[in-house]
Image (cartoon, rainbow, N blue to C red):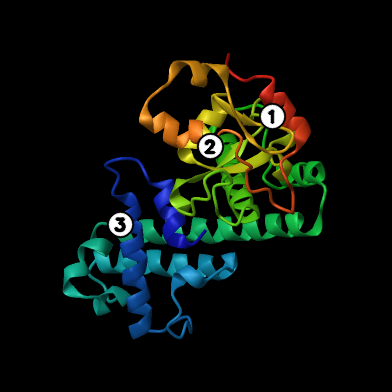
């Protein structure tokens, strides 16, 4: 997940302008460093930096320079374009750089997580190690606990999308923003397998919601099953096109970490009737 996607996913609430403001803020800072290459970036965008320690140095510098600018002192922001002066004046650049620093730290955590996935072939052991890495609590809803859970869930989505080559396993849709990592056994239902790649399926949002609602499932040969509820209740053309016509279709099964049949059996037993 690159910086832009990370930002949009984190600030995707209707009416929120924070995401666009942060992206614009980093673009402004990139241009300033092109004029005064204080950190030897040689034209490289901040979004390409992955070293948390280096990011922390840059973030502190920008925050200090923004305070100088706001107090009328000479700063790197003197080299900015006239139509961009509102960003440092309103502390938008320091907010953007703080968000960017969180992104770099998120990347570092993901690097360690990917190392775990790449070095193991046992889904349960991967889940155990990732739960430890992200310190995902069994209980607790305080801010710290929820942040850890969110980071773990974000990585789980990226892991599943990569395993399925960023395609919905049922429809083949490749539109990444619509793709979701669906847990076969739910987050609260099976704590030990929360981060197990064999407990995930890549589905587009409509099929994900239907799967979570136990309106659809998959049989022993990975073919789509429709619940009695959905078959008896719906007759519209939309239903026929997107569900009835897909019944019995084989999903795309990855060679690495295919969905666990024991998990799918549990899911099938809970189909809505």
Q: Position of residue 7 (x, y in %)?
A: 42, 54
The span from disc 2 to disc 3 (Cα, nearest Å) is 42 Å
Q: Circle 1 sits in a helix, a strand or a loop, which is it? A: loop
Quadrant housing residue 107: bottom right
Please say if the residues under marks 2 and 3 sit with CB atoms less than 8 Å apart. no
Report whether 152 appears left or right of 220: left
Residue at point 65%, 37% (across, down): 223
Q: Nearer the viewer, residue 122 or 54?
A: 122
Above or below, 46 against 172 in this view is below
| Above or below, 94 relative to 209 | below
Determine crowd level at label 2: few under 14, some 14-19, many 20+ residues with C-alpha closer than 10 A.
Answer: some
Element assignment for label 3: helix
Q: Residue at x 28, y 73 (%)?
A: 77
- Mark 2 to mark 1: distance in Å? 37 Å
Q: Which of disc 3 and disc 2 is earlier in sequence?
A: 3
Q: Earlier in the sequence, mark 2 or mark 1?
A: 1
Residue 141 shows up from this direction: no
- The residue positioned 42% from the left and 60% from the top of the image is 4
What residue sits right under mark 1 in the picture?
Answer: 138
For label 3, the residue is: 21
Q: Looking at the figure, which quarter contains the C terminus?
A: top right
The answer to whether one can see residue 193 in this image is: yes
- In the rendered structure, which disc, 1 or 3, sits on the residue that comes first in sequence? 3
What distance separates the C-alpha of mark 1 from that of mark 3?
35 Å
**Residue sitting at the far top:** 273
Which of pointers 2 and 3 indicates the residue nearer the eye?
2
Where's residue 55, x and y in %?
52, 67
Pointer 2: what residue? Answer: 246
> Who's the residue at 67% across and 45% down the image?
134
Direction from residue 23 to residue 206 in the image, left or right: right
Task: Give neighbour class at mark 1: few <14, some 14-19, many 20+ (Cα, 10 Å).
Answer: few
The secondary structure type at the circle numbered 2 is helix
């Amino acid at each position: 997940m690159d910086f832009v996607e990370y930002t949009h996913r984190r600030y995707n609430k209707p009416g929120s302008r924070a995401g666009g403001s942060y992206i614009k803020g980093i673009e402004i800072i990139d241009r300033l460093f092109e004029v005064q290459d204080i950190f030897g970036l040689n034209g490289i965008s901040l979004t390409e930096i992955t070293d948390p320690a280096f990011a922390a140095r840059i973030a502190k510098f920008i925050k200090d320079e923004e305070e100088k600018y706001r107090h009328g002192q000479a700063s790197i922001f003197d080299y900015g374009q006239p139509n961009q002066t509102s960003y440092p004046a309103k502390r938008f650049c320091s907010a953007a750089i703080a968000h960017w620093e969180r992104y770099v730290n998120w990347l570092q955590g993901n690097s360690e997580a990917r190392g775990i996935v790449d070095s193991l072939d046992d889904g349960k052991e991967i889940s155990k190690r990732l739960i430890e890495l992200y310190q995902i609590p069994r209980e607790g809803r305080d801010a710290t606990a929820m942040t850890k859970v969110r980071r773990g869930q974000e990585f789980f989505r990226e892991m599943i999308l990569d395993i399925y080559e960023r395609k919905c396993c049922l429809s083949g849709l490749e539109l990444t923003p619509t793709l979701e990592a669906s847990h076969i056994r739910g987050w609260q239902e099976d704590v030990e397998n929360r981060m197990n790649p064999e407990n995930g399926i890549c589905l587009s949002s409509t099929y994900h919601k239907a799967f979570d609602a136990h309106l659809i499932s998959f049989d022993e040969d990975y073919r789509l099953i429709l619940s009695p509820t959905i078959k008896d209740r719906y007759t519209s053309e939309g239903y026929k096109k997107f569900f009835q016509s897909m019944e019995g279709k084989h999903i795309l099964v990855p060679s690495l970490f295919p969905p666990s049949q024991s998990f799918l059996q549990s899911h099938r037993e809970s189909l809505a009737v």
